[in-house]
Image (cartoon, grey):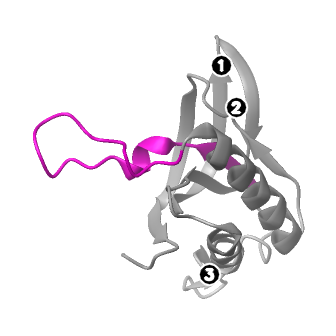
């Protein structure tokens, strides 16, 4: 599984011109499921996400997790994180899992993340066309891959 994690002052998902979900201070997580991913990948990614110390402490050092700051979480599915652009000009998405595999792992990740962070997790809508709005705080953006490729 792959994730782009952004520390935000606020973020939201708009679908068909209507606000679907929004958060204030916290993390916006764009997540994708790959063909070879398992529940163990989702566990790893959820634990890493919940424990990332990317919020500043009183000394201005990134030393606190989303749970420590009582931040909010917004998870948006984004299969394009598996886009392969090494050949040609059009991305290939053959490494991205089909919905029948991706949806259960995505939902499991959301549930596990909420448990580990001790808060509800807001989401987008899987496979919907979404407008994702955010104010990146810092900016701070972290890339995670359960295969530890980066």
- Work out whether residue 99 or residue 73 is closer to the camera in this orientation and state it: 99
Which mark identifies residue 15? Answer: 1
Q: Secondary structure at mark 1?
A: strand
Precedes in sequence: disc 1 or disc 3: 1
Q: Secondary structure at mark 3?
A: loop
Which residue: 36% across, 42% down?
93
Precedes in sequence: disc 2 or disc 1: 1
- Work out whether residue 61 or residue 73 is closer to the camera in this orientation and state it: 73
Residue 101 shown in magenta = no
- Work out whether residue 127 or residue 70 is closer to the camera in this orientation and state it: 127
Which residue: 56% across, 33% down?
132
Q: Is residue 79 left or right of residue 100?
A: left
In the rendered structure, which segment of residues is drawn in magenta?
73-97
Precedes in sequence: disc 3 or disc 2: 3
Quarter of the image containing the N terminus? Answer: bottom right
Residue 79 shown in magenta = yes
Q: Which residue is mark 3?
A: 53
Q: Secondary structure at mark 2?
A: loop
Distance in Å between CA atoms under marks 3 and 2: 27 Å
Q: Position of residue 108 (x, y in %)?
A: 78, 58
Q: Is residue 25 visible?
A: no
Q: Is residue 62 above or below residue 99?
A: below
Which residue: 42% across, 50% down?
81
Q: Position of residue 46 (x, y in %)?
A: 70, 70
């Amino acid at each position: 599984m792959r994730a782009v994690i952004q520390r935000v002052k606020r973020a939201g998902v708009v679908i068909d011109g209507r606000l679907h979900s929004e958060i204030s201070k916290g993390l916006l997580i764009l997540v994708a499921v790959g063909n070879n991913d398992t529940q163990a990948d989702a566990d790893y990614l959820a634990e890493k996400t919940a424990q990332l110390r990317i919020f500043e402490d009183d000394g201005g050092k990134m030393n606190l997790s989303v749970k420590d700051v009582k931040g909010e979480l917004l998870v948006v599915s984004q299969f394009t994180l598996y886009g392969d652009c090494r050949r040609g000009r059009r991305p290939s998405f053959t490494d991205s899992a089909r919905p029948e595999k991706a949806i259960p792992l995505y939902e499991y990740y959301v549930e596990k993340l909420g448990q580990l962070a001790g808060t509800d997790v807001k989401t987008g809508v899987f496979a919907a066309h979404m407008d994702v709005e955010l104010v990146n705080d810092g900016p701070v953006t972290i890339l995670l891959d359960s295969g530890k490729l980066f």
